[in-house]
C-alpha cells in the first residue's frame, strides 16, 4: 500500500486557496493568515474609535446645550450623540477588553451580564 491509501499514515490537507499545507496529526493547527492581524487590530483600533468618538460626541452635546432655546432637531441630535457614546462603551470597549486582557466583563457579575 502506498502512503495515500494507508489509513494509518498521516493525513495531509492541501488548501487550494492559499499555498500552504499542514499535517492533521500535529496538535497545533495554523491560526490563519489574518489571525494575528485580527488580534492586533482589535487591540489598536477600538481605543482610537472610543477616544475620538467620545470627544466628538461630548463636543456635540456641549454645543447643543449652549443654545438658549432647544429645538426639536437639537434635542434629537443631543439624544443621538448620547446614544452613540453609550454604544461606544458597550460594543467596542467589550471587544477590546476581551482581546487585550482575555477577560469577558459580562461574566463577572449578573448585572454586567444582563446589561450588555
Image (cartoon, rainbow, N blue to C red):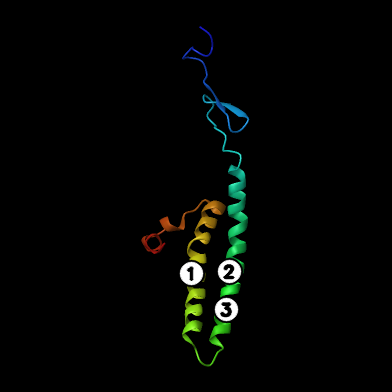
Identify the residue under disc 3.
60
Could you give the CA–CA distance between mark 3 and mark 2, rounded to whole angstroms? 10 Å
Report the label total. Answer: 3
To which residue does mark 1 refer? 86
Dividing the picture into quadrants, the one containing residue 56 is bottom right
Q: CA distance from mark 3 to mark 1?
A: 14 Å
Q: Earlier in the sequence, mark 1 or mark 2?
A: 2
Screen quadrant of the C terminus: bottom left
Tell me if label 3 and label 2 are in contact, CB under 8 Å: no
Q: Pick out the residue farthest to the front.
A: 73
Q: Quadrant of residue 108?
A: bottom left
Question: What element does badge 3 sit on?
Answer: helix
Residue at screen point 56% across, 74% down:
57
Label 3 CA crowd tier, 10 Å (few <14, some 14–19, many 20+): some
Residue plotted at (54% across, 80% down):
61
Q: In the picture provided, is 85 more to the left or to the right than 113?
A: right
For the point 61% across and 33% down, the residue is 18
How far apart in space, not on screen, are marks 1 and 2 (Cα)? 10 Å
Measured as percent of width and height from the top left, residue 93 is found at 52, 61
Task: Looking at the image, tell me whether mark 3 or mark 2 is earlier in sequence order.
Answer: 2
| Residue 85 versus residue 22 in the image, above or below | below
| In the image, residue 59 above or below residue 19 | below
Front label number (3 vs 1): 3
Residue highlighted by disc 2:
53
Q: Find residue 15 and report its image quarter.
A: top right
- Against 101, residue 2 (above or below) is above
Please report the residue visible at 52 percent of the width from the left and 70 percent of the height from the top: 85
Question: Residue 83: x and y, percent?
Answer: 47, 72
Amino acid at each position: 500500500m502506498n502512503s495515500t491509501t494507508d489509513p494509518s499514515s498521516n493525513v495531509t490537507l492541501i488548501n487550494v486557496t492559499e499555498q500552504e499545507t499542514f499535517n492533521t496529526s500535529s496538535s497545533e493547527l495554523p491560526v490563519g493568515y489574518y489571525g494575528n492581524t485580527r488580534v492586533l487590530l482589535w487591540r489598536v483600533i477600538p481605543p482610537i474609535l472610543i477616544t475620538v468618538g467620545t470627544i466628538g460626541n461630548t463636543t456635540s452635546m456641549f454645543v447643543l446645550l449652549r443654545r438658549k432655546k432647544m429645538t426639536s432637531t437639537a434635542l434629537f441630535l443631543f439624544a443621538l450623540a448620547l446614544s452613540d457614546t453609550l454604544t461606544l462603551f458597550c460594543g467596542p470597549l467589550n471587544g477590546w477588553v476581551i482581546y487585550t486582557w482575555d477577560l469577558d466583563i459580562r461574566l463577572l457579575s449578573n448585572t454586567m451580564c444582563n446589561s450588555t
